[in-house]
Image (cartoon, rainbow, N blue to C red):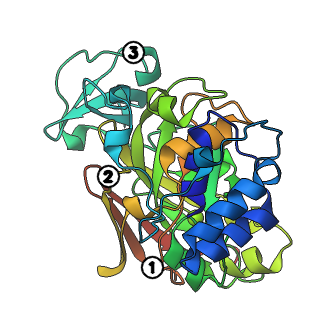
Amino acid sequence: MRRLIEYNHQTDRSRLVVQAREHLQILDLLEAGDNEKASDFLYTHLDTVRGIKTGITDRSAYKLPQTQPWSLHPPSSTDRPESNRKADPVKYARVETHGATRWAALHDNHFRLLDGSPYDGGRPQGPELAPDDVRLLAPVAPSKIFCLGRNYADHRSEMGYGHDVAPSVFMKGPSTVIGPGDNIVLPPRSMSTHVEYEAELAVIIGRTARFVSAAAAGDYILGYTCANDVSARDLQRGDPHPTRGKGFDTFCPVGPWIETELDPIAGVRLRCSVNGTLRQDASTADMTYDVPFLIEYLTGFATLHPGDLILTGSPGGTEPLHPGDRIDIDIDGIGTLTNSVVSDERS
Ligand code: MG
């Protein structure tokens, strides 16, 4: 519902300034099914809700649709410009071969090395390499990793949270990143005894981005990959800020490669299995804040650089991890990211 309010504002080309109290009152009215009263409230409190003076007196400009049901779903992919779609879909991987780290393109389960990075328009060169000829690395080396908390209603609920008044954004450091097949190292038990997986779709930024509108966001996306926002839940809940609980080394597995052709707004299936048992199964269409919105939101205050990551949040079904566990995160159209869990040697 909040997204619909925000998009309603965007039709006026205005910047949204979230004012918590007014938004929550509107949400309460919408949830009670009283769209007429919600429309009146939005009109009456427009300046406060948007945080700016509009001078607009046309009440109909802010009339909310009266049709039911209201939906948290983002606009469909058909609302997005064609430029969001890549003309030349390809999978990009970072690989180690003959002791060197190289970019490669993946076609039909074979790799061809690139003469540069995909951010710089690297082109395939040389012979095809079989999977056994390369070792997959994390497909990104980000300068920063933005993460969305509570971006799926079922996870928000299982964590005991209600409505958020704004996107819940936090960061993980670059030292959290590991690649396919690397081990997630649990913290020493003296620090944490409760670590959980969170399967998430990750966005890889392809161009330097600042003040990018949602409509133009696709031009700044290189592609997508699987990610695991590993979380020390006891520290996350006990600390005044989630930085430590989310920030241990190895707590951000990503991979296995970058898929350039994916439409998460229309919805792709995201699954997580632990030791072969399905634990999470969701559609990316169920995100509260979709990818274009997140890029507009984040680039409104920070410059995103090529290779930077946005983790878009976990659906429900997160559970504790134990040494020896194997986690498979599978996203349709991308592939499977597999990592195992080990204890810290100092435990
Ligand atoms: Mg998460």
Give the quarter of the image for residue 31.
Answer: bottom right
- Is 236 left or right of 329, judged from the image as shown? right
- Whether the residue under disc 2 has CB within 8 Å of ligand 1: no
- Is 250 left or right of 281, judged from the image as shown? right
Give the quarter of the image for residue 170.
Answer: bottom right
- Rounded to the nearest angstrom, the CA distance separating label 3 from label 2 is 28 Å
- Rounded to the nearest angstrom, the CA distance separating label 1 from label 2 is 36 Å
Q: Quadrant of the C terminus?
A: bottom right
Give the quarter of the image for residue 247.
Answer: bottom right
Image point 76% across, 66% down: which residue?
A: 242
Residue 141 at x, y percent in the picture: 56, 37
Of label 1 and label 3, which has the lower sequence position?
3
Q: Nearer the viewer, mark 1 or mark 3?
A: 3
- Is 236 left or right of 252, judged from the image as shown? right
Of label 1 and label 2, which has the lower sequence position?
2
- Please state the total of marks drawn on the protein image: 3
- Whether the residue under disc 3 has CB within 8 Å of ligand 1: no
Image point 30% across, 57% down: which residue?
A: 268
- Rounded to the nearest angstrom, the CA distance separating label 1 from label 3 is 40 Å
Q: Which mark is residue 324?
A: 1
